[in-house]
């Protein structure tokens, strides 16, 4: 008979790979001085809600993107120690007792930021600084908006409505090269010029900001693909549905409406070979 594992032996079993990787990133980034630069070139904006488990690691990696960096954490209705942990890590903390709403923290952070490059992250998963620096570099080299090239899972019989919305919006915008890249996904970076043109308030509705950016003379490009789908924590679902799905899809419909207002009822596309004059 195979002997049962004792509790002591179970405790010695290695941690799951993802957990070990996160712990290693936090340990490696701990050497970065926990202080915001007085004259930052890069402002890292991190909305967070009940992220005490990951926020220190996220901040530590964020500091590695540039030698002149400030980190701003917008604590959005948390019931845990996220604010205290972010503050002890040297970040500037803007805290709200009540939830602001999905992505509202981006607008708050952008309004407070003073850097020339604004890098947007989420507080619930750690991304290595080496994968964040390309977004800052892209903006430094002339891009106004540097997107995550992640397009979401598309090789499915029925892709997720949010994934379909992102691809459809980019096709309508005349940017099929962007595929499913969107300001909805992090990481992404904006230039100071982009903030001036779009306004910080629009960032609370990323699809609208995305459409507004593409329909102006702002330079929008994908900088690097970061597989955030594998890093994102699974959200609790109400009635079997993602509670944010409807809001994000509605924001994409609002983005299409903005596109039609700016480019006409055909969204700027021609009539092709149609001869409407012979139709009765």
Image (cartoon, helix red, strand yellow):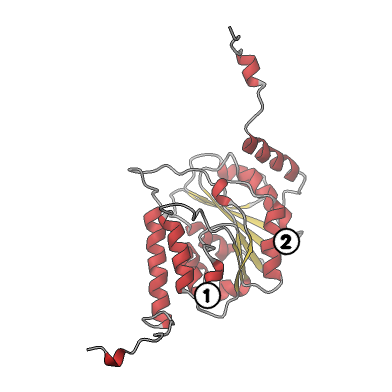
Q: Residues within 10 Å of mark 2 (few under 14, many from 20)?
A: few
Depth check, front residue: 24 or 71: 24
Residue 279 appears in the figure? yes
Residue position for label 2: 38
Residue at the extreme bottom of the image, as rendered? 277
Q: What residue do we see at 71% from left, 39% from top?
A: 24
Q: What residue do we see at 40% from left, 71% from top?
A: 256
Q: What residue do we see at 48% from left, 57% from top?
A: 103
Which corner quadrant holds the N terminus? top right
Which corner quadrant holds the C terminus? bottom left
Q: Residues within 10 Å of mark 1 (few under 14, many from 20)?
A: some
Sequence-earlier tag: 2 or 1: 2
Q: Which circle, 2 or 1, is nearer the viewer?
A: 1
Residue position for label 1: 214
Image spot of residue 264 (x, y percent) = 39, 83
Image spot of residue 26 (x, y percent) = 69, 41
Residue 124 appears in the figure? no
Image spot of residue 173 (x, y percent) = 48, 74
SS label for mark 2: loop
Residue at the extreme top of the image, as rendered? 1
SS label for mark 1: helix
Image quadrant assignment for residue 246: bottom left
Q: Which mark is residue 139?
A: none
């Amino acid at each position: 008979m195979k002997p049962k594992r004792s509790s002591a032996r179970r405790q010695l079993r290695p941690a799951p790979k993802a957990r070990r990787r996160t712990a290693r990133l936090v340990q490696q980034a701990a050497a970065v001085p926990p202080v915001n630069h007085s004259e930052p070139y890069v402002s890292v904006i991190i909305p967070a809600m009940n992220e005490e488990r990951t926020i220190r690691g996220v901040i530590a990696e964020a500091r590695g993107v540039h030698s002149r960096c400030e980190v701003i954490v917008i604590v959005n209705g948390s019931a845990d120690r996220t604010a205290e942990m972010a503050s002890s890590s040297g970040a500037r903390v803007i805290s709200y007792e009540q939830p602001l709403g999905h992505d509202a923290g981006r607008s708050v952070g952008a309004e407070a930021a003073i850097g020339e490059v604004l890098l947007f992250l989420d507080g619930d998963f750690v991304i290595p600084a080496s994968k964040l620096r390309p977004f800052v570099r892209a903006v430094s080299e002339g891009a106004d908006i540097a997107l995550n090239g992640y397009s979401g899972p598309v090789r499915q019989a029925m892709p997720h409505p949010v994934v379909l919305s992102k691809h459809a919006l980019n096709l309508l915008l005349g940017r099929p090269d962007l595929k499913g890249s969107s300001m909805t996904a992090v990481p992404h970076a904006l230039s100071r010029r982009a903030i001036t043109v779009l306004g910080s308030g629009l960032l609370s509705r990323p699809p609208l900001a995305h459409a507004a950016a593409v329909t102006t003379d702002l330079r929008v490009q994908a900088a690097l693909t970061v597989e955030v789908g594998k890093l994102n924590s699974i959200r609790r679902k109400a009635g079997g549905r993602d509670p944010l799905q409807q809001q994000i899809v509605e924001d994409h419909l609002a983005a299409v409406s903005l596109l039609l207002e700016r480019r006409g009822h055909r969204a700027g596309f021609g009539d092709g070979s149609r001869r409407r004059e012979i139709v009765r």
